[in-house]
């Protein structure tokens, strides 16, 4: 307990004044138990008799209540808040990075955050809840804790986990990697931040697909980069539209975010040629490559990289759960040591306990068993959403079905951007959370659209949400009563 004795008069009188001040200004709340007399005496270096005398006086004045065998408790005497300072509040001279970081934080809720006032929230990023996974993860963390190394972790990440990631990527994504190429990070966002630190100077141009993942834009712009959009069509990024001046391009070839397009092999080759010719870098964000529901996916872009120009990023946030802040980067040799050094300076390494638990979970096959179960659950939710949109929205929406991921993009065929915003506002009043494509774009999209996440709701709730969606469309006049029936 912090008490500032004023040095005026007897020690017990100083202690009385200090305790009264703490009680009256609210630093010690009513009902709070004060330290035992012996403990407080040791803390403030006075005799126990001094503390006892102060406690007795404060009880007599009604500031304290003594309970035999329990101690001394603060009485409810009200508080007198200290006066507000009259001086002008201090304005901190922020760095250019801090100003850019503030400018690129728009105050929107974190993806996956559930809004309590919504019956059905279709926000992208809401996690797939799986009680069985929670039980398995508790078991793995408990096992890891029994053998945890209390020393600082390896800044590059646990060797056991990096080995498991290499094995997984080789089998599932066709990515050849050695453990020394892998860096464990605290999610995709840190990966973008490290790449910006290592590869870019303030003023350099970074290319983003348009539309794109907003977190990437915020990270690079906070570091002083100029973000420039590149056109996306039904086959994903258009390499012919890439600017020649860019130092870096961020791409999602396996499942373009948010449109869902799959970049064909010919364009992947064009993209790699662009990077090699201009000595530029490519970041491949494979944010949900674990979940596909039809057809054999193309191997990752990284598997085609012969010039060491592709930095591959993966995350366990979507595959497992967002609160597990673990992801990874597969780094070309030319930038590996510098990126590991930047990681060390930033946080000295990710949690050793969680890395150990995840490494064992992967080694025992639990991770891939979970992925198989999750894919079955997600496929059912995706089917419920597709069927519901067809039944209740009809041709009012054009759905991009990519057979992958945890969301759908639905373009509105009979509306402008203002109509789309009205629809979102009206749906929210009815308890339905809808989200537009616009925040993911550098330029306004040519037509309005919605990003509909389906991972966070069971099929029955998705069916009800789609029914409510149809009602909202009808109430705003997008479709007639007959079309929605």
Image: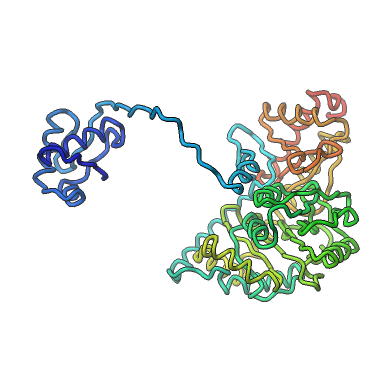
Q: Is residue 316 left or right of residue 276?
A: left
Name the residue: 24% across, 40% down: 33
- Looking at the picture, the colour scheme in use is rainbow
Q: Is residue 51 above or below residue 414?
A: below
The N terminus sits in image quarter: top left
How many numbered markers are drawn? 0
Residue at image position (76%, 30%) is 421
Q: Position of residue 364 (x, y in %)?
A: 59, 71
Q: Is residue 94 above or below residue 17?
A: below
Answer with left or right where residue 110 lies relative to residue 451: left
Going by the image, does 38 lie left or right of 181?
left
Q: Is residue 378 visible?
A: no
Quadrant of res 275 = bottom right
- The quarter of the displayed image where residue 68 is located: top left
Q: Residue 297 in the image: state x and y as whole percent.
A: 82, 62
Residue nearest the viewer, comparing 280 with 400: 280
- Which of 279 and 108 lies nearest the eye of the viewer? 279
Classify residue 476 as left or right of residue 238.
Answer: left
Residue 464 lies in what quarter of the image?
Answer: top right
Compared to 179, does 197 lie above or below?
Answer: above
Task: Please report the residue visible at 77 percent of the width from the left and 59 percent of the height from the top.
Answer: 247
Q: Which is nearer the eye, 21 or 133?
A: 21
What residue do we see at 15% from left, 33% from top? Answer: 58
Q: Position of residue 404 (x, y in %)?
A: 78, 54
Q: Nearer the viewer, residue 262 or 185?
A: 185
- Residue 476 visible somewhere in the drawing: yes
Image quarter (top left, top right, bottom left or bottom right) of the C terminus: top right
* Residue 371 at x, y percent in the picture: 67, 61
């Amino acid at each position: 307990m912090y008490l500032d004795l004023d040095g005026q008069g007897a020690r017990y009188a100083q202690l009385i004044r200090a305790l009264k001040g703490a009680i009256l200004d609210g630093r010690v709340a009513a009902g709070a138990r004060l330290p035992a007399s012996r403990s407080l005496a040791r803390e403030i270096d006075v005799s126990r008799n001094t503390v006892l005398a102060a406690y007795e006086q404060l009880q007599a004045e009604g500031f304290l209540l003594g309970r035999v065998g329990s101690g001394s408790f603060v009485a409810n005497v009200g508080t007198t808040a200290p006066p507000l300072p009259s001086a002008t509040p201090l304005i901190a001279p922020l760095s250019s990075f801090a100003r850019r970081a503030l400018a690129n934080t728009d105050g929107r809720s974190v993806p996956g955050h559930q809004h309590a006032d919504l019956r059905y929230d279709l926000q992208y990023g809401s996690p797939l809840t799986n009680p069985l996974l929670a039980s398995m993860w508790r078991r793995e963390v408990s096992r890891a804790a029994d053998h945890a190394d209390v020393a600082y972790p390896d800044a590059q990440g646990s060797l056991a986990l990096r080995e498991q990631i290499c094995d997984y990527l080789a089998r599932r994504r066709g990515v050849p990697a050695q453990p020394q190429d892998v860096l464990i990070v605290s999610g995709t966002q840190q990966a973008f931040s490290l790449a910006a630190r290592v590869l870019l100077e303030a003023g350099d141009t970074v290319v983003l697909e348009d539309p794109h993942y907003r977190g990437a834009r915020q990270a690079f712009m906070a570091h002083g980069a100029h973000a420039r959009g590149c056109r996306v069509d039904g086959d994903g990024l258009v390499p012919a539209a890439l600017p020649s001046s860019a130092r870096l391009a961020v791409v999602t070839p396996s499942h373009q975010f948010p449109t869902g397009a799959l970049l064909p092999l010919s364009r992947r080759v064009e993209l790699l040629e662009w990077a090699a010719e201009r000595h530029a870098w490519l970041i491949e964000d494979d944010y949900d490559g674990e979940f596909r529901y039809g057809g054999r996916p193309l191997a990752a872009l990284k598997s085609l990289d012969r010039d060491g120009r592709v930095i591959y990023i993966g995350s366990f946030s979507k595959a497992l759960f967002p609160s597990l802040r673990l992801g990874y980067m597969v780094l070309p040799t030319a930038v590996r040591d510098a990126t590991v050094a930047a990681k060390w300076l930033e946080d000295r390494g990710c949690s050793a306990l969680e890395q150990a638990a995840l490494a064992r979970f992967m080694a025992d096959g639990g991770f891939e068993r979970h992925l198989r179960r999750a894919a079955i659950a997600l496929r059912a939710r995706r089917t419920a959403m597709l069927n519901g949109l067809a039944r209740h929205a009809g041709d009012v929406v054009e759905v991009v079905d990519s057979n992958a991921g945890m969301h759908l993009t639905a373009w509105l065929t009979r509306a402008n951007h203002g109509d789309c915003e009205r629809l979102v506002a009206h749906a929210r009043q009815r308890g339905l959370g809808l989200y537009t494509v616009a925040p993911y774009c550098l330029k306004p999209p040519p037509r309005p659209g919605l990003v509909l996440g389906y991972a966070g709701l069971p099929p029955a709730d998705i069916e009800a949400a789609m029914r409510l969606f149809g009602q909202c469309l009808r109430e705003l006049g997008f479709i007639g009563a007959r079309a929605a029936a």
